[in-house]
Amino acid sequence: MSPHRPTSGTARSAPLPISEQLRRGNLLAADCPSRDVLKHVTSRWGVLVLMALEGRTRRFSELRRMIGGVSERMLAQTLQWLEGDGLIDRVAYPVVPPHVEYSLSPLGVEAAARVRALADWIETSLPEIAETWAEREQQR
Amino acid sequence: MSPHRPTSGTARSAPLPISEQLRRGNLLAADCPSRDVLKHVTSRWGVLVLMALEGRTRRFSELRRMIGGVSERMLAQTLQWLEGDGLIDRVAYPVVPPHVEYSLSPLGVEAAARVRALADWIETSLPEIAETWAEREQQR
DNA sequence: GTAAGTACGTACATCTTTGTAAGTATGAGT
DNA sequence: ACTCATACTTACAAAGATGTACGTACTTAC
């Protein structure tokens, strides 16, 4: 009975109560709140923002210039997502050319470290990965 | 003079030649090929697939059952992306109920480790992050 | 006087991703 | 005979992410 629940029929291995899912996330479960955090952190610009903020505070336009290709709209959006998750602190000075400073919260520092590790690995592994791309080209 | 290039006007800090960008990626540059890898690895299902394949080989439908909420379509798509980057090996046995096995390549094992580190952090930090969410609720 | 810089918000267009449903070939189980 | 499982593919539709352009309020530089 119960014809079907869209997210059901899978991940039945862990019928954890919600309370348990909040104690520690389980990303493989469809309805785990961790997925939202993952979405923000691994969003197209989220990764780059976290890395750009490592080390020190930055201003909005500074970030915009650092991160190639972001639009103002998406930068603002991404910063709000990460701020909403408590990974980024925002401080606005009520001066007349607006002045806002973004920095990593303690939580954000930890997140950035993981993201950085992944990014570094990708950057250094690029040549090796590109070889795979090249092989595929030939096979045509 | 060259009115504008859509991705230009940013990330001018590194006028690296293409050869240099392939030697080692630079994710902050708009046209770096690393961004494609990042997109695949950090895609909604990419992260989960890499984690699900850690430890051992899995079959398609096995992955589908492990990863809550994936559709067959997206699982296939994601596996192809990752295979195209050389992170996943695919072995198909020409038997009649199809039998295909997916596993991490050596490169994939490295990627999965980084992704796992991030995922683990998110899962364990969930409660703390959820606090931020709760605070925001109150402020309304 | 005019242009530029600042940190966004908003409306609108579009691109990409994702989901749903259906089809495929064949053997095993009932 | 009928259904199910397998590992996809394809067509179509919907949702979400992203981009573009414009507005803002005021100051500084030219």
Image (cartoon, coloured by chain):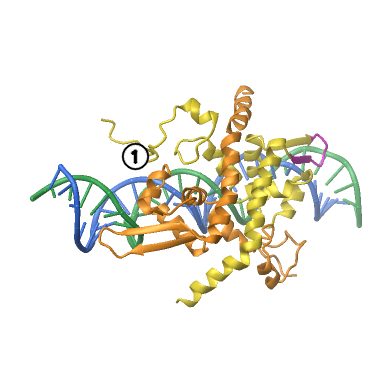
Chain colours: A orange, B yellow, C green, D blue
In the rendered image, which quarter contains the N terminus of chain A? Answer: bottom right
Q: Do we see residue B63 in this rendering?
A: yes
**Is label 1 in a helix, a strand or a loop?**
loop
Residue B95 in the magenta stretch? The answer is yes
- Nearest the viewer among D10 and A26 is A26
Horizontal side of B86 relative to A55 (left or right) equals right
Residue A69 in the magenta stretch? The answer is no
Q: Do we see residue B71 in this rendering?
A: no
Whether A41 is drawn above or below B109: the answer is: below
Whether B63 is drawn above or below B108: the answer is: below
Q: Which residue: 78% across, 43% down?
A: B57
Residue under label 1: B9
Horizontal side of B20 relative to A30 (left or right) equals left
**Disc 1: host chain:** B
Whether B9 is drawn above or below A140: the answer is: below
The magenta span reads B93-103
Q: Quadrant of residue D8?
A: top right
- Nearest the viewer among A91 and A76 is A91
Q: Quadrant of residue A31?
A: bottom right
Horizontal side of A97 relative to B5 (left or right) equals left
What is the number of callouts on the image? 1
- What amino acid does circle 1 point to? Gly
Q: Which residue: 52% across, 49% down?
A: A47
Q: Quadrant of residue A102?
A: bottom left
- Nearest the viewer among B71 and C6 is C6
Q: Which residue: 73% across, 68% down?
A: A16
x and y, in percent, of residue D26 in the image: 19, 61
x and y, in percent, of residue A32 in the image: 64, 63
